[in-house]
Image (cartoon, rainbow, N blue to C red):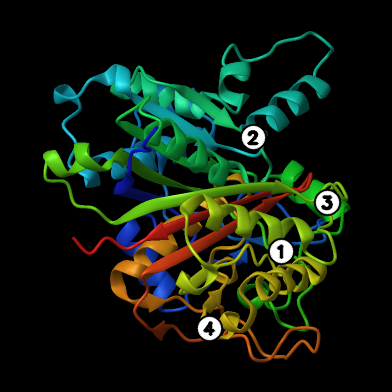
């Protein structure tokens, strides 16, 4: 069976460094930090007092008051970013077969704020179970694609992938396969997360995963730096319209890139720590290259998982050296989490968008906040430190990994025709 080609025809983003795709790209190329003191709640007793929050976001700019109350922030973000992507794609949804248009969305946690607030309200009450009737539908992780589907009448496959921080990368891979196997023409895919809450910050602090650099939050996310001390929690969403190539060509769509491959693997090692030798990460990149029928030498840029954890950064770069050999020195390697923080289940989506925009503009966004060389990291690798670099990119790879040992990798190629 000959597989169909799959392309990206629309993008949407709501991130800590920009509330639209154009704002996001402007923040990326200029090395903007999205990290600042938390405004959502009192952090006096928290170990970490900062995060990468969405700025200048008012739900009533997008939803009426009644509708907004029925949606957790993670679902609001999903709807906002997917609306931008659909508009960007130029699709007229009244002219397509909606049974062949699906929504496959990633979320690692879902409605954490809703869950937290309902449980707190119950615990502080008299024991009577007075829960909001929208508690469950606001909280469940699959409600984001459900709402996107309902809003636009999309009647193809509709579900959520949950694989911690690899969730939206897995969603994109599923979307790729549904289209290239001929089951769908178009899929709205991506991911969203809104875990900057008391429960989210407290939980990640308890496991010593977060940076505690409260004296300098804007520089706290520092992948590959010797002084890195954990990741910075972020929030937001990224959406991509994946479309069968001939379908896109027929309607004269703008094509950002071709999705040429997706790989998955598992570390099978530890609940939260990566394998120290990066074995699972090495395998996921090889699987992705094999799926795309491409060679390591074809890759020009890698947007790493790069969370700024002491173990994770080293393991990933070891794996890159193992897979790419001498060619690793010719690749622009970066971590956009230095600017956006870690968006958990939405990370794969917004970083895929960063990779696609880097190809489109021939600019690799920087890994900011790097001041101190880590002797465990190969100095010959180009980590795109502190300043964006111009270069032609024909093939870009995006890595995303999650607690539980989940590894996902997506490969994009520039279309010249």
What residue would you read off at disc 4?
Answer: 384
What residue would you read off at disc 2?
Answer: 162
Rounded to the nearest whole Å, what is the CA distance between mark 4 and mark 3? Answer: 27 Å
* Res 121 quadrant in image: top right
Tell me whether the residue at label 2 lies in contact with that at label 4, contact meaning CB atoms closer than 8 angstroms: no
Earlier in the chain: of badge 1 and badge 4, it is: 1
Identify whether 414 is placed above or below 30.
Answer: above
Q: Nearer the viewer, residue 239 or 395?
A: 395
Residue 408 locus on image (x, y percent)? 61, 50
Q: Secondary structure at mark 4?
A: loop
Around disc 3, counting alpha carbons within 10 Å, would you say few (fewer than 14), some (14 to 19), or many (20 or more)? few
Q: Secondary structure at mark 2?
A: loop
Rounded to the nearest whole Å, what is the CA distance between mark 1 and mark 4? Answer: 19 Å
Please identify, in this view, whether the residue under mark 2 or under mark 1 is nearer the observer: 2
Earlier in the chain: of badge 1 and badge 3, it is: 1
Earlier in the chain: of badge 2 and badge 3, it is: 2
What residue would you read off at disc 3?
Answer: 272
């Amino acid at each position: 069976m000959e597989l169909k080609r799959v392309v990206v025809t629309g993008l949407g983003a709501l991130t800590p460094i920009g509330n639209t795709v154009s704002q996001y790209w402007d923040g990326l190329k200029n090395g903007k930090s999205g990290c600042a003191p938390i405004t959502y709640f009192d952090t006096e007793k928290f170990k970490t007092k900062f995060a990468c929050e969405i700025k200048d976001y008012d739900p009533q700019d997008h939803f009426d008051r009644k509708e907004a109350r029925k949606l957790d922030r993670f679902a609001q973000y999903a709807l906002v970013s997917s609306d931008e992507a659909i508009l960007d794609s130029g699709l007229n949804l009244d002219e397509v077969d909606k049974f062949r248009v699906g929504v496959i969305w990633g979320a690692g946690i879902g409605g954490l704020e809703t869950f937290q607030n309902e449980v707190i309200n119950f615990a502080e009450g008299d024991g009577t179970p007075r829960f909001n009737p929208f508690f469950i539908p606001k909280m469940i992780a699959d409600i984001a694609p459900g709402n996107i589907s309902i809003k636009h009448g999309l009647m193809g496959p509709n579900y959520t992938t949950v694989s911690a921080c690899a969730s939206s990368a897995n969603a994109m891979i599923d979307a790729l396969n549904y289209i290239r196997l001929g089951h769908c023409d178009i899929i709205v895919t991506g991911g969203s997360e809104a875990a900057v809450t008391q429960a989210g910050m407290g939980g990640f602090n308890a496991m010593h995963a977060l940076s505690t650099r409260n004296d300098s939050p804007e520089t706290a996310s520092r992948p590959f730096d010797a002084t890195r001390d954990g990741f910075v929690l972020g929030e937001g969403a990224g959406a991509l319209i994946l479309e069968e190539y001939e379908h896109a060509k027929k309607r004269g769509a703008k094509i950002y890139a071709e999705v040429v491959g997706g790989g998955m693997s598992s570390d099978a090692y530890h609940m939260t720590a990566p394998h120290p030798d990066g074995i699972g990460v090495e395998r996921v990149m090889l699987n992705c290259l094999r799926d795309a029928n491409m060679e390591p030498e074809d890759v020009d840029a890698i947007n790493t998982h790069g969370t700024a954890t002491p173990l994770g950064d080293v393991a990933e770069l070891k794996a890159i050296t193992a897979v790419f050999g001498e060619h690793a020195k010719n690749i622009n390697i970066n971590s956009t989490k230095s600017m956006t923080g870690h968006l958990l289940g939405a990370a794969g989506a917004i970083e895929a968008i960063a990779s696609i925009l880097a190809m489109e503009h021939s600019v690799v966004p920087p890994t900011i906040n790097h001041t101190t060389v880590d002797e465990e990291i190969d100095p010959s690798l180009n980590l795109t430190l502190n300043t964006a670099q111009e270069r032609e990119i024909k093939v870009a790879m995006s890595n995303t990994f999650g607690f539980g040992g989940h590894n996902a990798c997506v490969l994009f190629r520039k279309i010249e025709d």
